[in-house]
Amino acid sequence: METVTVNRLRWGALAWLLTLQFFVVEAIAQSRYAGAYSRADDTISALGAGRSAAHQLMNASFVLQAALILAGALLLRPALLRAGGQVAPVLLTVAAAGVLLVGVFPSDGNALVHAIGAVAHLVAGGLGLIALAYAVRPRSEVLGTALALLGLVGTAATVFFLTGVTEYLGEGGTERVAAYVIPIGLAITGVALWRLAGPGAADRQAERAAARREQAERARERDAALEGVARRDVEPVDDDPDDHWAPVERRQK
């Protein structure tokens, strides 16, 4: 097992946080698109095609996204726990390879390779978030639940996109739901892992454990005090030691 070092956490978290660059570049490419462009009706790949004025920038963003996803998966792997920690890096590596193909082979170039890359990125990315949820759940149940929801939403949107069920959000809108959850989930995970396993995490865990022990001790003291009060309330009062109807213990006092 590799060691979780501060440097690995820092650079891995930064790599996944920087996957948000995709949204910035996409907005720039859309603003420079020749003609009308609809996020609901037009796919993301159209921004990387030759008709797009910023197609080189968009394709460079795809390639950079691949490098960032892969770097984060490799650097943060020691911080991922249990079986999910073994599966998530593999799936995210496939997702990185997929978006790399998307950037290197635009849709108006080698359409087949581009489509294979897009499918690999969306499918492996959604499933990778679900595996990542199980890998981080021992550290944070909230984070694990959030990642599981993002992964399920992305996977469902991928299925709808690939099967043509796009009448509600449009082809571009459905694809974006499937694609957007990946950088969002990775960015959240990177920041959270830095917080949960980075510098000072051990001290914070010790403080929380001490607080829990103190709270449990106070609860035991409170229960003991209540039990003592209840015992005094039910203890018989010996008003008349000659009372023949009294219990034997009282007559013997």
Image: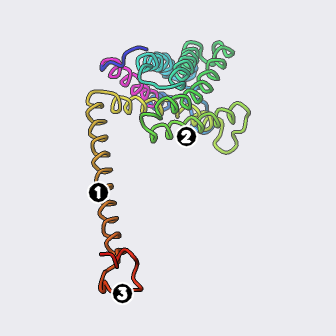
Counting from the top left corner in percent of width and height, residue 199 is at 27, 27
CA separation, marks 1 and 2? 41 Å
Which segment did they paint magenta? 7-23
For residue 235, above or below residue 138: below
Which of the 4 quarters of the picture holds residue 95? top right
For residue 210, above or below residue 136: below
Q: Report the coloring of the rendering.
A: rainbow
Which of the 4 quarters of the picture holds residue 158? top right
Residue hosting label 2: 149
Mark positioned earlier in the residue sequence (3 or 2): 2
In the image: residue 66, left or right of residue 15: right
Residue visible at 60% across and 24% down in the picture: 124
Residue 194 image label: none
Residue 173 in magenta stretch: no
Mark positioned earlier in the residue sequence (1 or 2): 2
* Closer to us: 251 or 48: 251
Query: SS at mark 1?
Result: helix
* Closer to us: 249 or 98: 249
